[in-house]
Structure formats: structure tokens, C-alpha cells
Image (cartoon, rainbow, N blue to C red):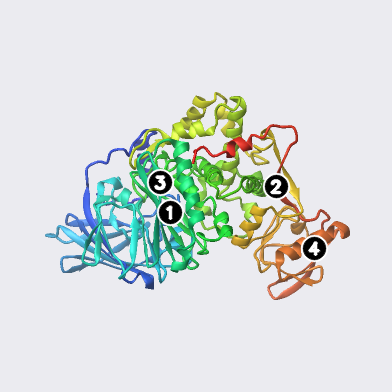
Amino acid sequence: MKKRPVGSALLGVALMLLLGNSAVCAQSPAALVTMSVAVDASAAARGILHVHERIPVAPGAVTLVFPRWIPGEHAPDGPIVNLVNLMIHAGDARLTWLRDPNDFYAFHVEVPPGNGAIDVAFDFVGAPVGFYSSARLSTRNMLVLTWNKVLLTPAAEDYRRIIIAPSVTLPANWSYATALDGAVQTGPSVHFAPVTMEQLVDSPLDAGTNERRWPLGSIDGAPVDVAVFADTPEQLDGADATIAKLRKLVAEMGALYHARHFNHYTFLLTVSDVMAGEGVEHGQSSDDGVNPGDFLTSDTTRTANGDLLAHEFNHSWDGKYRRPADLATLNLQVPMHDDLLWVYEGMTQFYGDLEGERSGFFTAQEWRDNLALQYAILDTTTGRATRTLYDTALAEPIFIDEPATWHAARRSADYYSEGELMWLEADITIRRLSGGRRSIDDVARAFFGGTSTGPTVVTYTRDDIIAAFNAVQPLDWRGFFVTRVDDIAPHPPNPFEAAGWRVAYRPEMSGIEKIFNDVNKDVDARFSIGLTADPQGVVRDTIEGFPAAAAGLAPGDKIVSVNGRAATEVQSALDNGLRAAEQSGTLRLLILNGGVYRDVTIAYSGGPRFPVLERIPGRPDLLEAVAAPRSGT
Ligand SMILES: [Zn+2]
């Protein structure tokens, strides 16, 4: 522990040199600090947690830091704005704290002589808005406790040297679930076995009034279950079909990787009309949420979120166990480098959708038509003409709370969907070159599966990925990635035609796009006139070079009427207008913006257009082999 500006470039470079590209986290070094954190969540239903820490310190200058770079969120978005009522005592003396002028996540105090510990008290208050986990804390019926929100710790270069004894006090009659071990009930509080700060931040706790658990099977002897927290008991009934798919998912992931890197695994899932949706990976659990709250019972909501649990589960192998070296930082104050997210997130997006299909969350057609949709969206993303896929990964932190407008020009987290297409292209390439004997599943099993362990981190670099692919199928993989990741690519990877399929445009939306748009409340005319909107008709995006932008439409314009008829249901009003435009060659809109109405005439005669995949006659269907389940169950 030393007083120094944390988060400095110098410290980041030192850590990267220290990390190298080998296994660095398999063994924890000796403890530097052993402290306790007690979270009084008895007022969780009001949206406030009372936190008390006892931290051994030496007298003199002490710096405490609040976690800034949050694992799984890949960004410096630790929600410090919600930390309030901070008081620090040494014995009976209240100490004056001073925030670091160069690092707003650091607090300095001077501990008087004769004191061997400080008591730190603060509150964490909920905010039902924001992005990622800052929007999730509690409702009247449930709590999502991610420990990075309730920790002020001494600044340490290696957070595995901070050992923390955690405890929580819950409202009466609330039950909880967590991957933390060694729970002992003491009065109203639950105490868990001390763990490293790394493991504590990686082990969220969900609690609530309406909980139900289901065992889902096991992988190499390690049990997997799901703990679901709901607004009402009824949201937990009638879940048999969904639970059966989750059991299939566990079997499929075992059949894919043949090994696991957890001692036990729990999906911590909120299904709620109040709590925000979420998906953040952890090694032995995942912080998952679906809003609306009928995920267990509605086919539509389940399908719209059909990749969520597969995606987060996949991260236990790809992301938590195998991790890019420059993402595996040794504390949460130094910058993470996101340049390999096209592997970490891109391949997980590929497997999230694919294992969702192999487990029955998607039909094969829904899986295929979603791939076509992602291709088509990426192909109308004009920002790709000036930004590489690499840059979308590297610059993720500045896009984490990007506005909903001007998406196509901006190009944002494309390493998810474009990564998915690239890894499918890699899979099709291996299958073709090996005559169907090998596939990307062999790379995944060797690289991310390995031999079963408990939670541990083994880091990698791009060279390690290239070597893993060459071990399965010799090819110029370095050049393959340069072309798709580092170079400006006018079009996204097209893995379809070599697999016997092609992207085609039809006048009706595919089933899966309709489900996504209904649940996500999107209006889509992007593939015809280059426009998206919200259900009230307020334009989110106009794509430069497409007819809507050429007619002067822009984000913020509200579509009031189409061809003289009120646009009460905006998607169908636009679709009807686009069908009429096939004859007339124009689409007439009444637009409201800034209290002023204006007429806009769009020149267009192509009709509604929505992407699907269709077979190329006479070519072998390789997507069928990709989609085939691997487990016998
Ligand atoms: Zn992810």
C-alpha cells in the first residue's frame, strides 16, 4: 500500500510488463490487507445500502479507492456518483477525507498516531437509470448486490492481496443466492468465508422475496443451477419449458468444452418489470436480468433474450478463465485495454447465439435470420468506411453510454455482431478445408476448455489465438485477422455463400426481427429508406446516402403521418407507405420537430425490405452442421 496517483499511465505500463502473456493469476500472493465489509441491506427496498468497513492501516497518510474499471463492463464506469454519506473514523476521532484532485475515485485521510485500523462508513444509493450495472440495485422485491459498489479499499497494486470478510444483512424473509462459499448466519447477518477482492468482485449476491431455484445438471462434477428472483410468485410458475432449455444449455456447454473452470456455477437471474435487464459475466455465476418479467413463461420474451444466458455462461470459459493479457489488470483503478474484445465478446456472441440455438432457445431459422439481420445492419453502418473493427473494440469505453441517435455514422460496439460473423466465417473455413472433420468447436475446446479447474485466469495475446487456430487447421490466420480486424472493410464478413446460403431481402420482416423489434421497441425502415425510429415515430437514425437522409430527415424528427394518414402504429404505417411507393415512387411524411410541422417527400420505389437467409440451390448446406447440437441429451 502506497500513496501514489493510481490509474496513471506509468502504473498501467508497469502492470502490462508484469502480466506478459502467461498465466499470472493461478496462485494468489500473500495478503497485504485483511479487512471486513458489512453491508446492511435491510432498507434495500428503499434503494439504499448502509456499508461499514474495518480496515487495518498504519498511522499516517492512507488512500482509499472505489473500483473504477469494472470487469465485464470493460470501462471506467464504477458508479461512484451513487456513493454518499462517507465518514471515516479512527477510534472515536472522525477523520477529514480529501478527494484526489486527479482521480475522483480516490480519497485521502491522515490517520493519527496510535491507531491500527479505521472504520469506514458510507451509503450506496440506487439509481434506476444509467447503463450496465449502475441501473441495477434494488426494487421493492429484490436486490442485486455487486460488491464493487460497496468497497472502498486501500490502494494496492495487486487486488488479490486484499482479503475481505464479507457479510450482508437482508430484509426479513428475503432469501439470497451467491457463488460465495462458507455462509454462516449470525443473528440477522450472513457471514461468508473471506476471499480475495478479485473473487469478491466476481461473486455478486442476489436476494429477494420471490425466489425459486432449479438444478440444471453438472459439468465435469461441478453442479450448475439457476436462482431466479421475480416481482411476483406468479412469474416463477409455469417455467418448465424454459428450465428444460437451460438444462440442455448446460449439457451443450459441457459437450463443447469438455472441462470447466468453476467449482459450482449459479445463474443469478432477475425477471422483473421494474429491475433493468442485464448480463455481466463472472467465473462461478453471472449477473443476469430480463425485463419484462415474463422470461420464464413467454415464448416471445424468452426468444428475444435467447442468447443471454448462453452468452454469459460462455464467458466463464472465454473471458473469465482465458482472458486477454491487457484486460487482466491487477487492480480496478488501472485502465483495461479492450483491443481483443473481438475475441472475448465476439466469439462469445458467436457461441451465445449458437448455443442458444443448439439448446432450443432459437429455432435454426431464427438463428439464421438473426445472422442475416446482423449482416444487413453492419452493411448499412456507414461508419465502417472510416473505423476498423479493431477500433470499435479499443474505444469501447467511450461508447458505453452512446446516444441512441446517429448509430450508423458513429459505429459502436460492432465487435459483438461483426465478431460473430467473422468467427462463423472462420468455422465455415475450417469445415471446408478439413472436409467437415474439424470445426471452430475444436479450437474452443482446446483453447478455452483445457483441463478442469476452479476459478483461475490464464491470459492470452493475439499470437496465442493465431497459434490455436493453426493447431486445428493450418492457414494464414494472421492475414485472416488483419483483413477483418485491422483493415477498413467496406462490407462485413460474409460467411454465408460458402455455406450454401445468401442474404436476401423480402417485403416482410423475419420472425426473429419482429420479436426483437417488438420487445426492444424499435421501428425499422433502415434497409429501404435508411431510417429507424422509436414506437412513437421519433427518428433515431437516418443513414447518410439513403433516401430518408437525402430528403432532409434527421434524428429527433417525429413522424406524424404517412401519405396523409395518421401514423398511430408507426411500423405498419411505414410498411404500408413503402408498399404504395412501389407504384408512386414517393413517400409523403408529415414531420413535427421543435413545435413546427413540415411536409417531407422521400423519393423511393423499392418497397419494404427486410433481410433473411435463403438457400443457394445445389450448394451443400454447411450451416446445418454448425447448428447441430453436440450433446446426446
Ligand atoms: Zn459478453
Q: Marks 3 and 2, how far apart in space?
A: 35 Å
Q: Is residue 265 left or right of residue 558?
A: left
The residue identified by callout 1 is 76
Vertical side of 500 occupied by 385: above or below: below
Q: Nearer the viewer, mark 4 or mark 1?
A: 4
The answer to whether marks 4 and 3 mark residues whose Cβ atoms lie closer than 8 Å is no
Residue 128 lies, in percent from the top left, at 46, 67
Residue 540 lies, in percent from the top left, at 65, 61
Furthest-bottom residue in this view? 595
Q: Nearer the viewer, mark 3 or mark 1?
A: 3
Q: Marks 4 and 3, how far apart in space?
A: 51 Å
The answer to whether marks 1 and 2 mark residues whose Cβ atoms lie closer than 8 Å is no
Q: Is residue 156 left or right of residue 139?
A: left
At 44% from the left edge and 52% from the top edge, which residue is drawn?
280
Q: Marks 4 and 2, how far apart in space?
A: 22 Å
Q: Which mark is residue 47?
A: none
Q: Nearer the viewer, mark 4 or mark 2?
A: 2
* Closest to the observer, 216 or 341: 216
User: Mark 3 vs mark 2: which is more N-terminal?
Assistant: 3
The residue identified by callout 3 is 217
Vertical side of 182 occupied by 91: above or below: below
Q: Nearer the viewer, mark 3 or mark 2?
A: 3
Label 1's element? Answer: loop
Q: Which mark is residue 612?
A: 2
At 31% from the left edge and 38% from the top edge, which residue is drawn?
26
Q: Amino acid at mark 1?
A: Pro
* Residue labelled 4 has its Cβ within 8 Å of some atom of ligand 1: no
Q: Amino acid at mark 4?
A: Gly
* Residue labelled 3 has its Cβ within 8 Å of some atom of ligand 1: no
